[in-house]
């Protein structure tokens, strides 16, 4: 029982990342009908928003501290962060330490801007081209974005730690009546899951309960009619692209403490996210979320020693196997709608 | 000639000439001159041109003709490489059986994967092939290299060791891949004034096979079978309405193109008896897509051009560093020189992928037909207005 629970928990954080990226992909696909291969790159740019903010906050200058001396007896030179100068060591240090959660605020406008720029600048011209062309141009764009990030940040992973208060692990088992140390879980992964749940909830609430969301949903169902009613549906869809980009970016920001970001992290997630979207059903938002969590949990179950000794390597291929089986038996995916990408 | 019409025959002759004279043509700069680093006429790179040319020609048969975009074609290349190296390990270093075996294994693989993947089309097909390729990569990388059953040798890559079986290996034969005793690394150097040309056995083997592959592709493009594949691309639904089943044709195209990939993989292993899982990684599949689109999907010569361009950039543009740039722009005033170098720096050397990505995006946006379409447009510009009008009137409008 405790093993099962632990594996479910382990699957949640990866599942959250898959679900968030797949949600963004589906939003773009459902609204604009574009297959966005650059979505992984958006995830990566989000992660690098966190890196940028951390670097920015840690900008420092050297001051001479008279009260301390180095081993030669000279006054010690200390690296002083500007932010500590301005806010004092207490608050300044706190801000630096909490840079990853703070990056969320920084990343939202950046990602929306990137998304809107991408849609207006490039993807707009591809609505009426075949899906293969859309795949190709976004694939090329992903390479370009990836190389730009590599140029500025180098090829090595950059560690971006979580705040100390959230970096430890908690003993979840004790809370629900297990022995001590049976279910120990890193705290940040809980945070990540909660964060993902909030974002997913917010996106759904936005689509369900606002007028804007209603129009967008109507546009997803029948774009032409909504346009004929005198609503500028293109602008709304552009904004949705921005939102989808922000969702991917936020997924990236919060993922940095789990996995130090490098320039090709987006591509690694993208392939799996596409599989998730297809399993969930093209164009179905709940399907994307459901499939994201399902596959994440399935993957973590397949990584247990028991599973890997029974069928060696199952953890590497389980997601692809599931995708193949689903595509062949339920071509529309788990929750795909009729009439969306049926060919 | 060769059963080709005049235009195709001419194209084929030009390709033969270029391929056979490549060690001359791609070495235009004298040894030791500043431009010598742009010489692409060394055996390693020449072999790659030919091998990836084969790979791209094969991919084009699937994508260019039927429109099915496979994002997992590198799996067949990797499988072919593994098969060839196993042939070296078990039997002989002779490349002929190794390459044949690579093609056969790749064919079996592509029948399996194609049969399943072709049940869907469009984006689903792309993702299914991608999933299969990633699965093969994961299996080759970790699972199939456990001590009990070491098929791929994991991260190290499969290679030939001295204690391998090699049943038909005799002492007189070279200890590396060879064609009936003639080592693929044997070369003949020709010094001509300041120039030095290398004629390599391996390259001419690859070139010969590429020419055969190219000839086969031309015949296939012009055959009724090729027409059928084009029909799948242009309107699959209508084709089904006429009572034809498109699936077997698409599967045949998939298998042929998988065999081309296997052939390329076998040749890669024959030039350097080493096979690693990274050849199957999905970026490798992406690369062949880039080559085909860049050159011009659906055209005969396009994929070869694209493969050449990408391999050239990978090997030559990636070598340009700041020192070289400073040398080039030494004629500019100092401040301007630094500015120009700083401007170009991100695009060359390690950043060549950026250049590649940008070229690719631009080609997809403005030149969906690739370099070949670009060439045609330029040619049309130079031809007079008269010729253009004549062309227009002679074009038959398809009945709709």
Image (spheres, coloured by chain):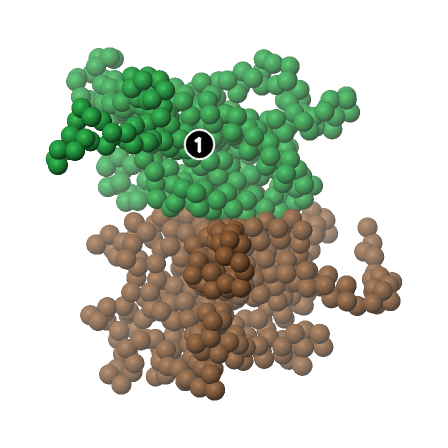
| Image location (x, y in percent) of residue A90 | 29, 17
Q: Secondary structure at mark 1?
A: helix
Q: Quadrant of residue A134?
A: top right
Horizontal arrangement in the rendering, residue A305 relative to residue A118 (left or right): left
Q: Nearer the viewer, residue B334 or A114?
A: B334
Quadrant in which the C terminus of chain A appears:
top right
Quadrant in which the N terminus of chain A appears:
top left
Q: Quadrant of residue B184?
A: bottom left
Q: Residue at x 55, y 33 (%)?
A: A114
Horizontal arrangement in the rendering, residue B202 relative to residue A37 (left or right): left
B252 over B26 or under it: above or below: above
B321 over A81 or under it: above or below: below
| Image location (x, y in percent) of residue B39 | 48, 72
Q: Residue at x 74, y 28 (%)?
A: A224
| Image location (x, y in percent) of residue A131 | 62, 43
What residue would you read off at disc 1? A49
Colour of chain B in the rendered structure image: brown
Colour of chain A in the rendered structure image: green
């Amino acid at each position: 029982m405790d093993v099962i629970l632990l594996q479910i928990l382990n699957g949640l954080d990866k599942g959250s990342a898959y679900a968030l990226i797949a949600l963004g992909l589906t939003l773009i696909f459902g609204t604009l009908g574009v297959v966005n291969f650059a979505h992984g790159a958006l995830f990566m740019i989000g992660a690098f928003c966190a890196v940028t903010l951390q670097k920015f906050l840690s900008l420092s200058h050297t001051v001479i501290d008279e009260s301390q001396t180095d081993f030669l007896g000279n006054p010690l030179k200390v690296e002083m962060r500007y932010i500590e100068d301005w806010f004092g060591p207490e608050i300044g240090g706190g801000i630096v330490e909490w840079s990853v959660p703070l990056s969320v605020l920084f990343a939202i406008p950046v990602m929306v801007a990137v998304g809107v720029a991408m849609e207006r600048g490039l993807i707009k011209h591809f609505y009426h081209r075949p899906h293969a062309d859309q795949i190709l141009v976004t694939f090329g764009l992903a390479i370009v974005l990836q190389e730009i990030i590599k140029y500025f940040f180098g090829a090595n992973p950059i560690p971006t730690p979580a705040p100390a208060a959230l970096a430890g692990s908690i003993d979840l088992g004790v809370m629900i009546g297990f022995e001590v140390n049976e279910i120990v879980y890193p705290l940040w992964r809980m945070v990540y899951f909660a964060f993902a749940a909030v974002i997913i909830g917010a996106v759904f609430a936005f689509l369900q309960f606002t007028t804007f969301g209603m129009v967008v949903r109507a546009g997803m169902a029948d774009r032409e009619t909504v346009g004929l009613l005198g609503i500028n549906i293109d602008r709304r869809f552009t904004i949705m692209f921005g939102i989808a980009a922000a969702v991917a970016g936020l997924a990236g920001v919060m993922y940095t403490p789990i996995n130090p970001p490098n320039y090709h992290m987006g591509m690694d997630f993208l392939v799996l996210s596409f599989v998730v979207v297809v399993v969930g059903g093209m164009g179905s938002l709940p399907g994307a979320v459901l499939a994201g969590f399902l596959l994440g949990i399935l993957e973590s179950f397949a990584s247990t020693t028991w599973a890997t000794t029974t069928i060696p390597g199952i953890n590497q291929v389980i997601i692809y196997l599931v995708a193949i089986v689903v595509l062949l038996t339920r071509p529309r995916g788990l929750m795909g709608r009729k009439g969306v990408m049926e060919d | 000639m060769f059963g080709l019409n005049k235009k195709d025959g001419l194209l084929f002759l030009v390709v033969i000439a270029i391929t056979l004279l490549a060690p001359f043509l791609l070495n235009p700069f004298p040894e030791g001159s500043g431009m010598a680093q742009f010489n692409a006429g060394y055996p390693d790179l020449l072999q790659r041109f030919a091998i990836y040319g084969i790979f791209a020609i094969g991919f084009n048969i699937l994508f260019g003709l039927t429109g099915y975009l496979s994002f997992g074609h590198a799996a067949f290349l990797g499988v072919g490489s593994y098969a060839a190296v196993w042939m070296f390990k078990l039997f002989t270093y002779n490349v002929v059986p190794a390459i044949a075996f690579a093609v056969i294994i790749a064919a079996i693989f592509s029948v399996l994967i194609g049969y399943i993947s072709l049940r869907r089309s469009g984006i689903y097909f792309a993702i299914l092939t991608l999933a299969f390729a990633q699965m093969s990569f994961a299996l080759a990388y970790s699972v199939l290299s456990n001590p009990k059953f070491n098929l791929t040798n994991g991260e190290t890559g499969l290679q030939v060791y001295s204690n391998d079986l090699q049943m038909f290996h005799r002492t007189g034969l070279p200890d590396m891949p060879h064609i009936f005793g003639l080592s693929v690394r044997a070369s003949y150097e020709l010094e001509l004034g300041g120039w030095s040309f290398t004629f390599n056995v391996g390259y001419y083997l690859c070139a010969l096979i590429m020419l055969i592959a190219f000839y086969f592709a031309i015949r296939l493009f012009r055959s009724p079978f090729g027409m059928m594949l084009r029909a799948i691309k242009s309107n699959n639904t209508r084709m089904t309405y006429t009572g034809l089943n498109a699936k077997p044709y698409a599967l045949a195209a998939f298998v042929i193109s998988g065999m081309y990939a296997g052939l390329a993989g076998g040749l890669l292993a024959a030039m350097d008896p080493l096979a690693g899982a990274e050849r199957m990684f999905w970026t490798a599949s992406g690369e062949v897509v880039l080559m085909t689109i860049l050159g011009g999907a659906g055209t005969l010569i396009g994929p070869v051009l694209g493969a050449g361009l990408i391999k050239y950039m990978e090997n030559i543009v990636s070598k340009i560093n700041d020192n070289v740039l400073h040398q080039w722009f030494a004629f500019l005033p100092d401040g301007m020189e630094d500015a120009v170098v700083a401007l170009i720096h991100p695009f060359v050397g390690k950043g060549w992928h950026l250049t590649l990505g940008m070229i690719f995006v631009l080609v997809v946006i403005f030149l969906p037909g690739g370099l070949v379409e670009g060439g045609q447009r330029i040619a049309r510009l130079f031809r007079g207005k008269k010729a253009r009008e004549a062309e227009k009137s002679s074009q038959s409008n398809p009945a709709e």
